[in-house]
Amino acid sequence: MRETLRRRAVNGLFNAADKLAAASFPPMTMEEIQEEVNAVRTQRKQFAPGT
Protein backbone atom coordinates (compact mmCIF):
# COMPACT_ATOMS: atom_id res chain seq x y z
CA MET A 1 0.00 0.00 0.00
CA ARG A 2 2.81 2.44 0.84
CA GLU A 3 4.46 1.72 -2.49
CA THR A 4 1.21 2.43 -4.32
CA LEU A 5 0.78 5.75 -2.51
CA ARG A 6 4.40 6.69 -3.21
CA ARG A 7 4.02 5.81 -6.89
CA ARG A 8 0.84 7.91 -7.15
CA ALA A 9 2.58 10.87 -5.51
CA VAL A 10 5.54 10.60 -7.88
CA ASN A 11 3.26 10.29 -10.90
CA GLY A 12 1.29 13.32 -9.73
CA LEU A 13 4.49 15.32 -9.40
CA PHE A 14 5.58 14.45 -12.92
CA ASN A 15 2.12 15.22 -14.31
CA ALA A 16 2.17 18.63 -12.63
CA ALA A 17 5.68 19.31 -13.98
CA ASP A 18 4.55 18.40 -17.50
CA LYS A 19 1.56 20.76 -17.27
CA LEU A 20 3.74 23.56 -15.93
CA ALA A 21 6.25 23.11 -18.75
CA ALA A 22 3.46 23.14 -21.33
CA ALA A 23 1.94 26.34 -19.92
CA SER A 24 4.87 28.47 -21.14
CA PHE A 25 4.79 31.04 -18.36
CA PRO A 26 7.20 33.92 -18.84
CA PRO A 27 10.24 33.75 -16.55
CA MET A 28 10.03 35.66 -13.27
CA THR A 29 12.67 37.95 -11.90
CA MET A 30 14.08 37.34 -8.43
CA GLU A 31 12.17 40.42 -7.25
CA GLU A 32 8.88 39.00 -8.54
CA ILE A 33 9.57 35.68 -6.86
CA GLN A 34 10.37 37.43 -3.57
CA GLU A 35 7.14 39.43 -3.79
CA GLU A 36 5.17 36.21 -4.21
CA VAL A 37 6.97 34.58 -1.26
CA ASN A 38 6.29 37.62 0.91
CA ALA A 39 2.61 37.61 -0.06
CA VAL A 40 2.23 33.94 0.88
CA ARG A 41 4.01 34.51 4.22
CA THR A 42 1.74 37.46 5.00
CA GLN A 43 -1.36 35.43 4.17
CA ARG A 44 -0.23 32.51 6.34
CA LYS A 45 0.38 34.83 9.29
CA GLN A 46 -3.15 36.22 8.95
CA PHE A 47 -4.72 32.78 9.10
CA ALA A 48 -2.32 31.14 11.56
CA PRO A 49 -4.01 29.57 14.60
CA GLY A 50 -3.66 31.61 17.77
CA THR A 51 -3.19 34.95 16.05
Image (spheres, rainbow, N blue to C red):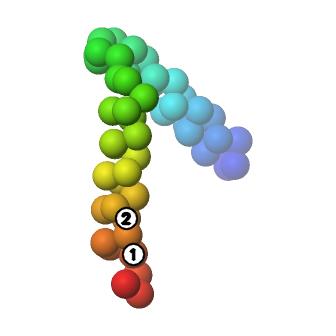
Residue 44 marker: 2
Quadrant, the C terminus: bottom left
Dot 1 and dot 2 residues touching (CB under 8 Å):
yes
Location of residue 8 with respect to 2 vertically, above or below:
above
| Crowd rating for badge 1 (residues with CA inside 10 Å; few <14, some 14–19, many 20+) | few
Count of marks placed on residues? 2
Q: Is residue 44 visible?
A: yes
Q: SS at mark 1?
A: loop
Q: Amino acid at mark 2?
A: Arg
Q: Nearer the viewer, residue 18 or 37?
A: 37
Please state the horizontal and vertical placement of residue 14, each as a whole percent of the image.
51, 24
Q: Residue at x 33, y 42 (%)?
A: 35
Location of residue 38 with respect to 14 vertically, above or below:
below
Please state the horizontal and vertical placement of residue 29, each as a whole percent of the image.
37, 24
- How far apart, in angstroms, are the residues tagged by discs 1 and 2? 6 Å
- The answer to which quarter of the image holds residue 50 is bottom left
Q: Residue furthest right?
A: 3
Q: Amino acid at mark 1?
A: Ala
Q: Which residue is mark 1?
A: 48
Q: SS at mark 2?
A: helix
Q: Nearer the viewer, residue 47 or 35?
A: 35
Q: Is residue 19 visible?
A: no
